[in-house]
C-alpha cells in the first residue's frame, strides 16, 4: 500500500467515529456471517459421518489404552478427559478461521472500516461453538456411558455440562488471543492451533493428571481454562452426589477468571493489530 493510500485510509477511519456501528451490532452480524461460513464447510452428512465419527474414534482409541492396561479407572479417566477435550480441540479452529480473513482478502476491509475489529473476529468464529459442544456432549453422554462412565442423579450431569461450556468458552478466548498473533503470519495458522491444543492435551489433565508433571509445568497448566474446567468435572464425578456442585464451584470459578483474562487479552491484541495496520498501512488488498 502506498503512503498516500495509507494516509487516506487512516483519515477515512478517523473522520467520523460517531458513524461507526456499535460493537454489539457488529458482533450480531458477524455471528450471522459465521453461521453461513459453517454451512459452507459442513453438511449434516459430512459433519456426522466425517467429523463426528472421526473424533469419537479418538475417544475410543484413548479409552482402549485403559482396557489394554486392564485398568478400569484409567479407561474412565481417559474417556471423560478426551470426551470433554473434543470440544476444546474443535474450538481451536478459531485460529484458522480468523486467518482466513487475511487469505480471502477481507482483512483490509475490516481494518479500514469504522468501529472495532474484535467483535468481527469474536462473532464470526462462534460458528464453531454448536459443533464443539454437540460433539463433546455426544462423547460424554452417549459414548462414555457405553464405556462405563456413570452419572449419578442430575447434579454431576449439570456440573459436566457447565464444566464443558466454561472450558470451551474459555478456550475460545485463548484461541482469539492466539489468532491475533497468527494474523501477522497466517501461514502458521495450522501449526499454532495444533501446537496449542497438543500442549493442552499433554499438561491440562486430559490424558494424565496435572500432578504428574513437574511443578513449573503444573503452574503453566493453570493458565489454560480447561485445566480448571476439567478438574472441576473430575472432582464432581469423584464426589458424592450431594456435594458434587459444591466441590466443583472453586474450579469453575477459576476457569471463568482465567477465561476472562484471556478474553481481555484477545480484545487488546486484536485492536492493537488493527491500530498498527491502520497506522503503517501494512495490510494491502493483494495481501
Image (cartoon, rainbow, N blue to C red):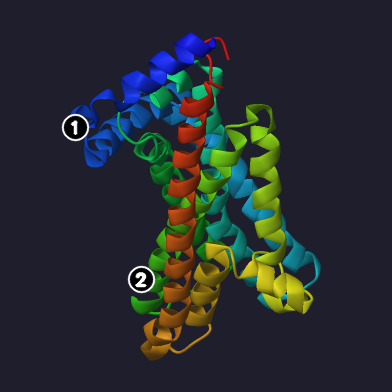
Q: Residue 186: which numbered mark, if any?
A: none
Task: Judge the density around disc 1: few (<14), some (14-19), many (≥20) Cα neighbours within 10 Å.
Answer: few
Q: Position of residue 189 (x, y in %)?
A: 64, 34
Reading the image, the residue beneath label 2 is 158
Q: In this rendering, is residue 18 above or below 158?
A: above
Q: Hey, which quadrant is residue 27 in on the image?
A: top left
Q: Is residue 11 left or right of residue 41?
A: left
Query: What's the residue at 26%, 31% (across, down)?
Result: 29
Q: In this rendering, is residue 165 above or below 102?
A: below
Q: Is residue 20 left or right of residue 146?
A: left
Q: Depth check: 270 or 57 in front? A: 270
Reading the image, the residue beneath label 1 is 18
Q: Is residue 58 left or right of residue 52?
A: right
Q: Position of residue 126 (x, y in %)?
A: 39, 41
Q: Position of residue 114 (x, y in %)?
A: 30, 27
Q: Depth check: 258 or 62 in front? A: 258
Of the residues tagged 2 and 1, which is closer to the observer?
1
Q: Depth check: 178 or 247 in front? A: 178
Amino acid at each position: 500500500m502506498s503512503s498516500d493510500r495509507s494516509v487516506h485510509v487512516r483519515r477515512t477511519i478517523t473522520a467520523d467515529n460517531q458513524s461507526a456501528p456499535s460493537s454489539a451490532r457488529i458482533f450480531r452480524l458477524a455471528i450471522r456471517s459465521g453461521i453461513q461460513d459453517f454451512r459452507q464447510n459442513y453438511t449434516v452428512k459430512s459433519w456426522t459421518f466425517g467429523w463426528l465419527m472421526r473424533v469419537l474414534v479418538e475417544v475410543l482409541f484413548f479409552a482402549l489404552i485403559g482396557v489394554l492396561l486392564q485398568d478400569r479407572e484409567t479407561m474412565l479417566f481417559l474417556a471423560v478427559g478426551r470426551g470433554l477435550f473434543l470440544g476444546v480441540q474443535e474450538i481451536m479452529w478459531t485460529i484458522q478461521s480468523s486467518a482466513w480473513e487475511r487469505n480471502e482478502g477481507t482483512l483490509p476491509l475490516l481494518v479500514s472500516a469504522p468501529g472495532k475489529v474484535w467483535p468481527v473476529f469474536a462473532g464470526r468464529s462462534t460458528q464453531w461453538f454448536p459443533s464443539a459442544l454437540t460433539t463433546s456432549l455426544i462423547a460424554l453422554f452417549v459414548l462414555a456411558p457405553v464405556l462405563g462412565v456413570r452419572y449419578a442423579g442430575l447434579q454431576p450431569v449439570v456440573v459436566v455440562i457447565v464444566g464443558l461450556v466454561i472450558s470451551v468458552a474459555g478456550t475460545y478466548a485463548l484461541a482469539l488471543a492466539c489468532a491475533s498473533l497468527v494474523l501477522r503470519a497466517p501461514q502458521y495458522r495450522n501449526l499454532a492451533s495444533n501446537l496449542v491444543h497438543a500442549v493442552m492435551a499433554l499438561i491440562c489433565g486430559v490424558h494424565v493428571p496435572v500432578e504428574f508433571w513437574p511443578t513449573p509445568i503444573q503452574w503453566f497448566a493453570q493458565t489454560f481454562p480447561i485445566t480448571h474446567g476439567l478438574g472441576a468435572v473430575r472432582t464432581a464425578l469423584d464426589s458424592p452426589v450431594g456435594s458434587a456442585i459444591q466441590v466443583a464451584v472453586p474450579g469453575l470459578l477459576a476457569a471463568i477468571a482465567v477465561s476472562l483474562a484471556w478474553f481481555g487479552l484477545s480484545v487488546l491484541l486484536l485492536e492493537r493489530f488493527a491500530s498498527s495496520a491502520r497506522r503503517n498501512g501494512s495490510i494491502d488488498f493483494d495481501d
